[in-house]
Image (spheres, rainbow, N blue to C red):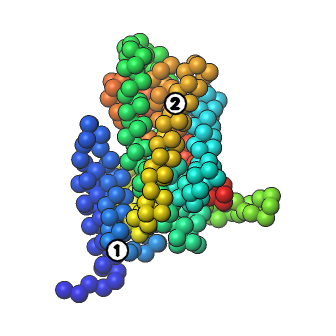
Amino acid sequence: MELSEVAQNILTVFAVACLGYLVGRIKIWGISLGATGIFLVGLLFGHLGVSTPRVLQDIGLVLFIAATGLSAGPGFIQRIKRSGSAYIILCLTTTIVGCILCILAVKVGHLAAPLAVGIMAGSFTTSPGFAAAQEAVRANVEAVGQVSAGYGLIYPIGVVCTVLFIQIVPRLLHANMAAERRLIETESTVDTPSSAQQKKDGFKIDKYGLCIFSIVVVLGIMLGSVSIPLPGGGRFALGLTGGPLAVGLLFGHLAHNHPGLLTVDNKLIGPIEEIGLLLFFADAGIDGGHGVAKILAAYGATPILYGLLMVITPLIIGYLVFRFYLKLPLLNGLSALTGSMTSTAALAVLTQQAKTDSIAAAYATTYPLALILMVLVMQFLIAL
């Protein structure tokens, strides 16, 4: 049987996805990697010499980011007005600590800047940040591989450490979960349009809102292509990551307040996000797999040590800031902390531990802020 190049690429991507989902289902101490298993299997395929076209990764990235923005948009502005300053301070704290450690890894640890940025993206388990870093070096094949390798090495460590931290802190404090749950009840409420408003704005261009989603993608790519000159001769652009994210957040917010015309069906957003993640993780993993062995041979355990520092240090300092400076309730603060580290796995564990979905409000507010910060920061750090 002889397959065309196109057929081989399609077969490879979905073979990686199939095996990746199976790997992602494996639980160790109650922790599973989910869709990130695709990335790990992709690393293995790439290490074995398999290649796929970069365009698959870019398409997956845009689908994933646009859908993420749309899903996070509803209630985003309300929550920012309500508790935004505290969440912004927490996001800035964890991000700045991560940036300082990343710079130290380059200047003191003598790691290549793309590798160090990939390690930071893995430590913060941030797919959009990882994508932004890759996009910033896309003209350099070796640098793209270093970003992917750093991310692939550290991402599992980032997930496990964050999940363990979230579980250990309440136990060390002997927290009264019932009392903590009562403190966060008001944070979960978001104003919804009246039924009359929903009926008034009930016109849709197509059944599922695919036209609106397409508009978000088009406008996001156009916004991301706007290049702003920086001091020293450099230029800055939101790119394929920041542009669709910003437009998605805006449309998600507008659709929440004016449902119908600008609405993308919620039943559609989840699958689009997952398909985008599938394409992105499969191709990014294959890219990264080409350089993992080379990175370990060149640097030994140093990247892993810096990865551990970039996970644990922001978590500890972030906890101290929200607990003693911002005075946030424990569950609210931990939820916001998981958002600042963009760790959905940790949020899922915290939700189970707290036995309430109300904690998701703080995460839903902090997460988009962290994504925007990471997208911006990664592009600056890559120029070190």
Instruction: Classify residue 113 as left or right of residue 62.
Output: right
Residue lying at 26% horizontally and 84% vertically, measured from the top left: 3
**Quadrant in which residue 172 is drawn:** top left
**Looking at the image, can residue 252 be seen?**
no
Question: Which residue is more in the foreground, 118 or 55?
Answer: 118
For the residue carrying disc 2, how many other residues have a C-alpha within 10 Å: few (<14), some (14-19), or many (20+)? few
- Give the residue at mark 1: 50
**Looking at the image, can residue 111 be seen?**
yes
**Mark 2, secondary structure of its residue:** helix
Residue lying at 52% horizontally and 43% vertically, measured from the top left: 310
**Quadrant in which residue 225 is drawn:** bottom right
Instruction: Classify residue 186 as left or right of residue 168.
Output: right
- Give the residue at mark 2: 316
**Mark 1, secondary structure of its residue:** loop
* Tag 1: amino acid: Val
Q: Earlier in the sequence, mark 1 or mark 2?
A: 1
Direction bottom: furthest residue: 2
* Tag 2: amino acid: Ile
